[in-house]
Image: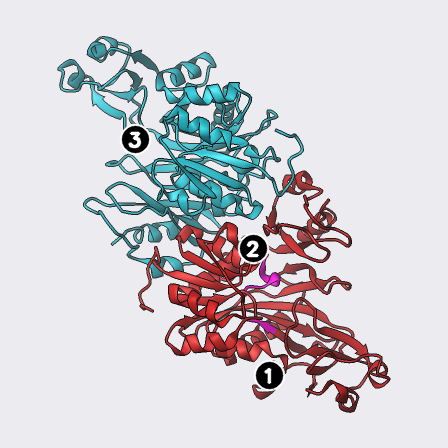
Chain colours: A cyan, B red
Amino acid sequence: MNKSVKLPPDRRIGVIGGGQLGKMLIEASRPWNVKYTVLENDLHCPASSVADKVMLGGLKDAEAIRKLALECDVLTFEIEHINSDALLEIEESGKTVIPSARALKTIQDKGIQKLFYREHAIPTADFVICDTPSNLSQVLQPFAGEKVVIKQRTGGYDGKGVDIVTKKDIESGVYISPGPCVVEHFHPEITEYSVIVAADRHGNVVTYPLIEMYFNPQSNLVEFLFSPAETTADLEADCREAAMRAVKYLQSPGLFAVELFVTEKSEVLVNEIAPRPHNSGHHTIEGSYTSQFEQLNRILLDLPLGNTEMVQPSAMINLVGAEGQSGPYKLKYTKELLAEPGVYVHLYNKTEIRPHRKMGHITVMAEGLQALLEKAGKVREWAVFE
Amino acid sequence: MNKSVKLPPDRRIGVIGGGQLGKMLIEASRPWNVKYTVLENDLHCPASSVADKVMLGGLKDAEAIRKLALECDVLTFEIEHINSDALLEIEESGKTVIPSARALKTIQDKGIQKLFYREHAIPTADFVICDTPSNLSQVLQPFAGEKVVIKQRTGGYDGKGVDIVTKKDIESGVYISPGPCVVEHFHPEITEYSVIVAADRHGNVVTYPLIEMYFNPQSNLVEFLFSPAETTADLEADCREAAMRAVKYLQSPGLFAVELFVTEKSEVLVNEIAPRPHNSGHHTIEGSYTSQFEQLNRILLDLPLGNTEMVQPSAMINLVGAEGQSGPYKLKYTKELLAEPGVYVHLYNKTEIRPHRKMGHITVMAEGLQALLEKAGKVREWAVFE
C-alpha cells in the first residue's frame, strides 16, 4: 500500500463478518467516505445497512474470502472464527491483511494462545493443555482448589466454550470436555478488566485507559463496564503494560482488546486477546477522543494513531435479549433513555430478538466517576426490550 | 404519526436534497437504523453513500416530492430552495412535514421573513422592501450612512444574493438589483453569531450555546467559528433569547440556525433563520452532547429533545476549494491533521473540487477556550487541498 495515504482515502476495505462490530467500524468511517465490502452469509446482517456492498458467502469459505480480497485494498475481520489459512495465503500473495493471519492463528486456538503467553513471559493463569478429553482427570494434579476452568481450544465465543467445573465432576465422569481443551487454574476472587490496544504498521503501540467489567453470571456476557476503572494508578499502569506487551509480541498491526484478571493479591493475568474491536471498547465511541472503530480505520488506512484519552468517564450497558424474548422488539424505555443527558443508544440492526442475543448497547457519560456510576445505575433499569 | 415512537423507530424519513447536510443527518441516525430516502437530481450526491435510497428528481419538481412523500412517514428538507407549494399540499393531506411548509414559506422569501420579524417585534436591521428594482434609488431615504445591504428576496444562499453597495452606485445606476429585494441598513461594525434552536412537536424549544463566526470576505462563507462565544453572559443570554423567540413565532417543529448581528452598541439583531441543520452547527457533532443532526433525528421521530450543552469548547473550520482548484482532490496535510489530538475531519463525498465549494469541515476540541483558539489557529493552516 502507498505510504502516503491521504483523505479522502480512495481505498476499499474488505471485512470478513457483517455483525455489529463491522457495522460500527463502517459507521466510524463515513466522515472519510471509505468504501467497505463485507462478507457475510446473510444479506440482512447488521452491517448491511451501512456497508457499500455485502458479498454473500461463508466466513470459512476460502473461495469467498479470496473473492473479497480481489476487490479490496485491505482485508480485516470482525470475528475470529474464519478461515485463517485462506487469509494466510492472501497475505503471502502480497495483500495487506490486518491483523496478520499469523496473529489470528495464535489467537484462534486457545492452546496456542496460552503457549504464546508462556513463551513471552506474559503473566497468565497456570494451565495445562489436554488434547484427549478422556484423559482430563489425569492432568488435574497441578491445580490447587476444588475447581478448574476448562476452555475449548477452538470455537468458543462470548463465554461459550468456557466451563468452570469441580475436579470431582471431572474425576467422576459427570463432566466430559467436548473437545481438546486448556485446563486453567480457577481464581475465585478476581476483578475483570480490559485494555484496548492499537498498533499501527510502523511499530507504534498505544493503549486506552483501563476498563472495569461486570459479567452476567448466566450468559457470561459483559453486562456493564466503565472506564477509567476505579483502581490505583499502579494497577492501571500494570494492566496497560501487560496488555501492551502481549500485543507487541503478536507483531501485527491491528486493534486488540486484552482481557485481564486481577487476583485478590493484585496479580495481573492476561486472560485472552481479541484481535478486533471489542464489546469492552464500545464506550469509546462517545467517551474517547478516538473511538476504537475510528482507530481501526486509521490503522487500516495507514494514518496516524489517534489520541486514546477519554473526553469524559464513560460506562457501557449491553442491550441483550431476555429469557423468552423472540421476534420483533422495541426498547421499553426509549423516552426515559433519550431524555437523560449524556446517554447514547446504539442498536445493531438485528432482524429479531433472541434470549442472550446482543441487540445493542448504551453509552453513559458524566463529568465524574461517582456521577457516572449513579447515572449508569439508573439507566441499567431501562436497558430492556418489550 | 403514532405518539409512542420507540427505538428501533420503524419509520422512513424522506429528505428533499442530498447534500452534506443530508449526509450528516443520516450518519447521525445510523445507531438507530432509521430508514432514509433522499430526493436529489444526482445519484452521486454526498448523501448517496449513506442513504438507504436515492430518488432521482428535481427539488422543485412537485411530482417528485409527492412521490417521495408517498414512500416516507415524515418529510424534511436540507435546503430552502425547494417547491414549498408541493410541500404545503402534502402537509395538508395529513403527512408530517418538519419544519412546516408554512415556516419554510416565511423563510424562503427574505421580504416575508423580514416582515415576520417586524410583526413579532423581533429585533432586526431596519429595512424597506423594494419589488421594482428600477425604483431602488427612491427607497434609500430612511437609511443613514453611505452604504446599504441589498438582499434578493428569493434564491440566495451562502452569501450569494446579498450585496453591500453604496447609495451613490444605486443612484447613479452602477448597481442594479437583479430582482425584487430587501434594502437593509448596513451596520459596518458587527460581530456575527449563530444560535442553533431545536423545537419539538409539543412546543418545547431549546437553544445551543452561542457560536461566534468569522467569514471569508471573498466568498462570504463561514470560514471559522467556535462555541461557546468569547462574550459576556448577558450578551449570550440576549442572543439565545432572541433566537428562541424568533423560532417560537414560526410555530413549527424543526432544527433551526438563527444568524445574529451584534452591533458596536451591543444591540442584538436577527439577520436570518435557516430552517435546517446549518454550517454554523457542525462543531456540535463532536462538541455537544447532542449534535444538531441527532437533534433533528429526535424531532423527526418525535423523541425527547437532547441535551444542548457542550462536552468541550469546540471550533469548526470549513474545508473549501481554493481559487483555481478543480477535479480530483486530496487533503494536503492529512497526517498533520490526524496526528493532532481532538481534531476531526469530515469530508462530504463530493466528486470534484471547485473554487469556494464546501468540500468538508474540521472540528477542533480542547479543554479551554484559549487552548482551543491556539489549536484551531494551527489547524487552519492545514485546511487546504492539493
Q: Which residue is mark 2?
A: B45
Q: Please, which chain is the residue tagged with disc 1 on? A: B
Residue B278 among those drawn in magenta: yes
Circle 1: residue type: Ile
- In this rendering, the answer to whether B252 lies above or below A319 is below
Q: Which residues are magenta?
A: B273-287
- In the displayed structure image, the side of residue A340 where residue A149 appears, left or right: left
Residue A250: x and y in percent read 49, 20
Which disc number belongs to residue A159?
A: 3
Q: Quadrant of residue B337?
A: top right
Q: Secondary structure at mark 3?
A: loop
On the question of residue B245 being in view, the answer is no
Say which residue appears at 41% left-offset and 43% top-offset: A47
Circle 2: residue type: Cys
The one nearer the camera, A206 or B97, is B97
Q: Secondary structure at mark 1?
A: helix
Q: CA distance from mark 3 to mark 1?
A: 64 Å
